[in-house]
Image: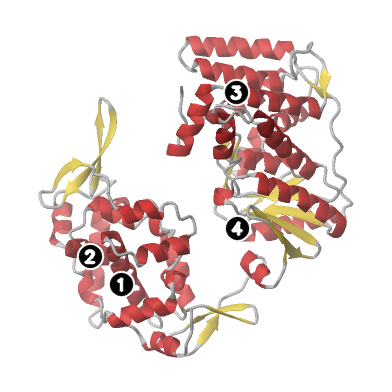
Amino acid sequence: MMAVIQIMGEMDLTIEEIDAMTGPAIGRPKTATFKLADLVGLDTFLHVADNIYPLIPDDEARETFVVPDVVRQMVDKGLLGRKSGAGFYKMNKTAEGKQILTLDLETLEFREKQSAKLGEITAAKSIEDLPMRLKTLAFGKGKAGQAIWKMLSATFSYSAMRLGEICDQAADIDQAVCWGFNWDLGPFQVWDAIGFRKVTERMKTEGLTLPPWVDALYDSGAEAIYRTVDGVVQSPTAEAGVFADLPTDERIFDFDILRAENREVKRNPGASLLDLGDGVLGLEFHSKMNAIGQDTLNMVMTACTEAEKNWQALVVTNLAENFSVGANLMMLMMEAMEGNWDDINMIIRAFQTATGRLEHCGVPVVTAPAGLTLGGGCEMTMGANAVRAAAETYIGLVEFGAGVVPAGGGCLRVYQRNVDALMDKRDLQPAFRKAFETIGTAKVATSAAEAVELGFLRPGDSWSLNRDHLAADAKDLALSLAAGHYVSPVEDQAIPVMGTAGIALAESVLFNMEQGGYVSPHDTKIGMELAKILAGGVVPPGTTVTEKDMLDLEREGFMRLLGERKTLERMEHILKTGKPLRN
């Protein structure tokens, strides 16, 4: 942070430009630099810097820790960050809403926040692969590229010089920074990502300080800081040429290592099958944000067939930050705009078939979600015979916000689970109301425990506190089910429904909410489609329906809503802004 402030002055950059360059663009949190300073508190920031400077008389970067006068002036004025209501940024409440203001470092007065007009950053947003994005930005020729190189190279030099002084091996620094500051990659990992040799050559040319261990590594012809020997990952120590093994944990899976060991069974652009060992097959999603498209659905079907032939159990998981953000909205919206209704019908049928295939597979299927598990991701999760979720799992059916209803079995399974929880199966109203409210308000559980309360997980489903152990825990659960001769459930042919009584109940609730201004007319239209699905259609109260009946209702309701202009507006708004539109 001190180096960034120094570079900011040298290159005449703004606060907004610095934060645009030091946030998600380079694999760091949205707090970037100055939002982070505000979060920590400028007084704390000042104390840390002032504490370091006198204690490091021989540090090659000592002068970097000299605090700029403007920071002292901010502290004197009480501009301490969020704790005082203002720092580098200030939230101003107006009649129109909230407005973010930015501090003018010359006058110490606040001004309107400006957009950071950096073409390189804008262009890099389309590069999903972080190493490729870092490489593009670090070697860019524009203002952003030059600044990012200065920031990264300063970090590389300082981190390399601290090896042996504050820790034993390079991996320790990477772990500390990633765990402590929530970076996606630590400094040495970034160094490798953008090219160890190319970066080192440039740093040498520019006269940046490097320790003997880096020189020795470069002279040896090494292409990277990290290396793998006999399947064990190693990183350098401060002693030139000497490496140390990274501590290993047999309960942490690394899918890249499995691939390197030729344990990838099948692969397409959306998903892969991996041998997890002990007769367990793993299904990994790896599309952008793990959105579920046709490639993913095809691999689900392939996974179940392969598992039934050659494996004891199937585990559906991945090591990404988010399990899945749901179906590919862009694909569905484009198909609808072109009027390809037969294609949409086939896509939805394929989705329903895939989730049903997971549920009725001939071997036990365990899903292991973590992070965002939304829409279709939630439906995939619920399709399994058992779930081992990360404790921090944000799971829910959020289709209502996109102007549609769940159509991959989500309505069916949430309703089934609420019916199963009833003590008196003759009174279906509590199950209907809870399912209607959960789906109709697009509720998202903020933990695995809450997901049980909302019906996305069963009471018997479990979760892992240690995210790193999630895949191993799911594998153990799958093997225990297989050892117990688990039999997958048959399709439910007699699901009790409220029929016209449920539709009437929902209609009265939605009418009152619309009259009170709580929902829009389009919300009411979506709500009525949802009610028809959960009620089992326009049938007499007390009727029973099959799983296929409810899935048909889901698909038909989804397609009717997808043909609505206001639904397409909602989808387009979500794709552009990431936020729901109420229209």
Q: Which residue is mark 1?
A: 154
Question: Crowdedness of circle 2 by 10 Å Cα count: few (<14), some, many (20+)?
Answer: some
Q: Residue at x 47, y 31 (%)?
A: 580
Instruction: Report the disc number at residue 319.
Output: 4
- Of pointers 2 and 3, the one earlier in the residue sequence: 2
506 lies left or right of 218: right
Whichever of callouts 1 and 4 sits on the residue coming sooner in the sequence is 1
* Of residues 513 and 229, the one drawn nearer to the viewer in this rendering: 229
- Please give the name of the residue rendered at 68% of the width and 13% of the height, measured from the top-left corner: 503
Residue identified by numbered label 3: 561
449 w.r.t. 255: above or below:
above
Q: Nearer the viewer, residue 127 or 506?
A: 127
Looking at the image, tell me whether mark 2 or mark 1 is earlier in sequence order: 2
Q: Quadrant of residue 531?
A: top right
Point out residue 576 in the picture as x, y percentages from the top left corner: 44, 38
Q: Earlier in the sequence, mark 4 or mark 2?
A: 2
| In contact (CB < 8 Å): disc 1 and disc 4 | no
Horizontal arrangement in the rendering, residue 217 relative to residue 524 (left or right): left
Does residue 578 appear in this view? no
Question: In this figure, what is the number of numbered marks?
Answer: 4
Numbered label attached to residue 7 = 2
Tell me if I can see residue 30 in this picture: yes
> Mark 2 touching mark 3, by CB under 8 A?
no
